[in-house]
Amino acid sequence: MTNESATAESDVEIAIRENHPALITYITAGDPSLEDTKAYVEALDRGGADLIELGLPFSEPIAEGPTIQAAINRALDAGTTPQGFFELVDDLETEAPLLVMTYYNVILQYGPTADVRPFVERAAEAGLSGIIVPDLPAEEADPLRDACDDHGLDLVFIVAPTTEGERLETIMSKASGFAYVQARLGTTGARADVSNATHDSLARLEEYDVSEPRSEARRAQSDGVPKAVGFGVSEGDHAAEIVEAGADGVIVGSALVDIIADHGEGDAPAATDLEAKARELKRGALRGAGGEVPEPEQP
Amino acid sequence: MSKSERNRERDSDPTFGDYGGQYVPEALMPALQELEDAYERYVLENEDGFVDEFRERMRDFGGRPTPLQRADRLSERYDREIYLKREDLVHGGAHKLNNALGQVLLAKYMGKERVIAETGAGQHGTATAMAAAHLDVPCEIYMGRTDVNRQRPNVYRMRMNGAEVNPVDAGSATLKEAINETMRDWATTVERTHYVIGSIVGPHPFPKLVRDFQAVIGREAREQIREQAGRLPDSVVACAGGGSNTMGAFHEFVSDDDVDLVAVEAGGSSLEIDEEEGLAPNSATLSTGTDGVLHGAMTKLLQSGDGQIMESHSVSAGLDYAGVGPELSHLVDTGRVTPVSVDDEDALNGFHRLSRLEGIIPALESSHALGYLERAAGPAAENASSPERSSADSRAGNPRDNGDEPRAESYEDLGDLVVVNVSGRGDKDLETVLEETEKRDLEAAPEVEVFDRD
């Protein structure tokens, strides 16, 4: 079935292409409260984030390291639910498109029975542009892929350092929005350097021609899925190095969550620090692309 | 079609009905594909003599076959033939070695340099540590801090065998958290590490792989009961946490329609759940769970309406898990396996009764199966029900309501010839049993004051 939304332009891809090299930020919704999250998302938006991922907490986040796991626990302790999360998104007005990052069981349980559709419908209604599911490999993704297509949402897939050959082609044939290139093996978490695996992964993606769009409809309006690199990125210099290596965007999560963790609930300076960090990362990304780097704004 | 081709066709399917699958981070998918390939070649097709070596080591190192023992006094008490499959006599004291030795050997055939495992009660960790020492493979074990504290003898044993034990502090610090942490280790070191999953849970092919290593329990029991009793049993009873001893005992009987398969879950202190607190005071996933995805598979889970996984409870650390194997979920849905449950107190009574009547100290896990025997066939059941024993199509098996007499009519009719799987021995549980017995007035327990330490 061909439908209108599947052929519509992807907000996510446009945001990355028009703001190349793009900054993609992650924070956990409800950490430490949904009210704070609203302020933090707006701060990241002001600081130059081109896409914002919001984590919807799941009690067993097997792909996350200690930083994000702790944020998820704080959010769950604060009573964050999918309903509350969607109400927050209803309220948000940002320039950057928003994506939800959550685990498959949370998506499945949103409706009255184990089915992905009610979640996707609500996500579209709230104005989300895409979904990332760390425990959903391409093999199991068809129900969610179809539901996202029907509602015009992007479904972002992760490409790991261990992903090669046919698997890479399978993933790229199903991916939309961008390919989330995992910079290193393991879980999420800020690191002091950029892994060599990043360069290898980007090179491998080039080799396997990631610009192959996933359908004829997309072929018509897009020249491929952009590549963004995450896992361990924490500083402007990392962002520069990753963009220099050929990425279209950098993804930063734990370094931002660390800032939130250092502040208490209802703490306005956290928003200021997040905005400044986003600026540093965006400047780094621009430097990596050899483009104009704006002067930092005076406080 | 050759047997190996049939096996291939049957076992390349990653699902059991609606359950199973592979819900893991992308980084792990190539490792699962590699494992699928190794499973088909070595386990199903005996490439390089893998299965021969495994069976030989299970015999010489593991002590197989284990006896199927007629339990004379239980038979008398329950007025029927009760046979015990003595997995407590496997080296290390539990059925866990069947799987651990199989997987560590497979890891060696696959050229992996290191194995990791999670453990709840410590029996799987102990079995993995023993198998790793036996086969000279470096080994690390993740174990929830709560379980480290309540299962100290097994922690010592793992370390004696040279394994590193990493306590996990997250959440309720039990099996679920230990699995999360082991998956994280695996996602970091996947290229050189094999994750020895301890039950029939996790992503494909683990549920099939572990089941095949454990199926030896039922295979032996089936031959033994025919030899000793002259026919197949009316029912096979096994406790169910994740479900590896359960599927191990059941697998060879699944196509024998006349043999009832009864999975006894941990009813904990109650089958009610506290949605607000996210607590299930039980681990009765097959009886009360709902469909969802946890630790790599679609299966039945103890979860909130929002899909958050509940903290489960059982007096037995080995049953204390909010999930269950996908194959068991499927067999329950299709009606082939009947899930029942008994509470902590029934299990403790089962523990003491077997110790006293038969001279066998069972694991607290297995004690649930023995506790169910009393509920379904004991004097209380007979007093409380009509001479006609429970109907075979009922499946409630709920523990007593508010301390009232059990509703005997809701228990399964186990028939005249029953095989009970004694999945492990209870030495590891003595501290817990003493502590929990002291809190209660248990009919089957001895006086415990003499054990007071100071």
Image (cartoon, rainbow, N blue to C red):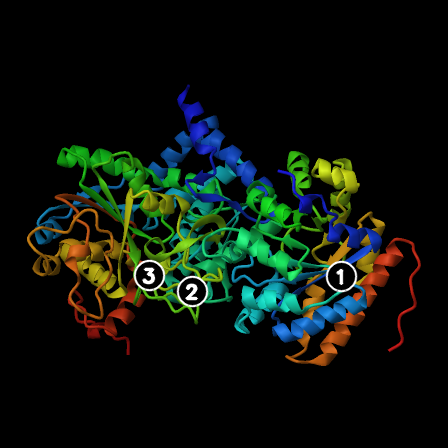
Q: Toward which corner of the image does residue A282 lie, by quadrant?
A: bottom right
| Residue at image coords 36%, 38% | B58
Specify the quadrant that holds the N terminus of chain A. Answer: top right
Mark drawn on residue B316: 3
Identify the chain of the residue marked 1, using the numbered disc in the image. Answer: A
Is residue A170 at all visible to an observer of this figure?
yes
Mark drawn on residue B311: 2
Q: Secondary structure at mark 2?
A: loop
Which one is in front in this view, the residue at disc 2 or the one at disc 1?
Answer: 1
- Residue A296, position as x, y percentages in the image: 89, 70
| Mark 1, residue position | A96
Task: State which tag comes first along the sequence, 2 or 3.
Answer: 2
Q: Give neighbour class at mark 2: few <14, some 14-19, many 20+ (Cα, 10 Å).
A: many
- Residues at discs 2 and 1 in contact (Cβ within 8 Å): no
Front position in the image: B426 or B201: B201
Q: Secondary structure at mark 1?
A: loop
Q: Is residue B441 left or right of residue B307?
A: left
Q: Give neighbour class at mark 3: few <14, some 14-19, many 20+ (Cα, 10 Å).
A: many
Front position in the image: B75 or A156: A156
How far apart in space, not on screen, are marks 2 and 1 (Cα)? 37 Å
- Going by the numbered disc 2, the residue's amino acid type is Glu
Q: Give neighbour class at mark 1: few <14, some 14-19, many 20+ (Cα, 10 Å).
A: many
Is residue A259 at all visible to an observer of this figure?
no
Looking at this rendering, what residue extends furthest in the top direction? B1
Residues at marks 2 and 3 on the same chain? yes
Identify the chain of the residue marked 3, using the numbered disc in the image. Answer: B
Looking at this rendering, what residue extends furthest in the front direction? A4
- Residues at discs 3 and 1 in contact (Cβ within 8 Å): no
Front position in the image: A109 or B338: A109
| Residue at image coords 55%, 48% | B24
Which one is in front in this view, the residue at disc 3 or the one at disc 1?
Answer: 1
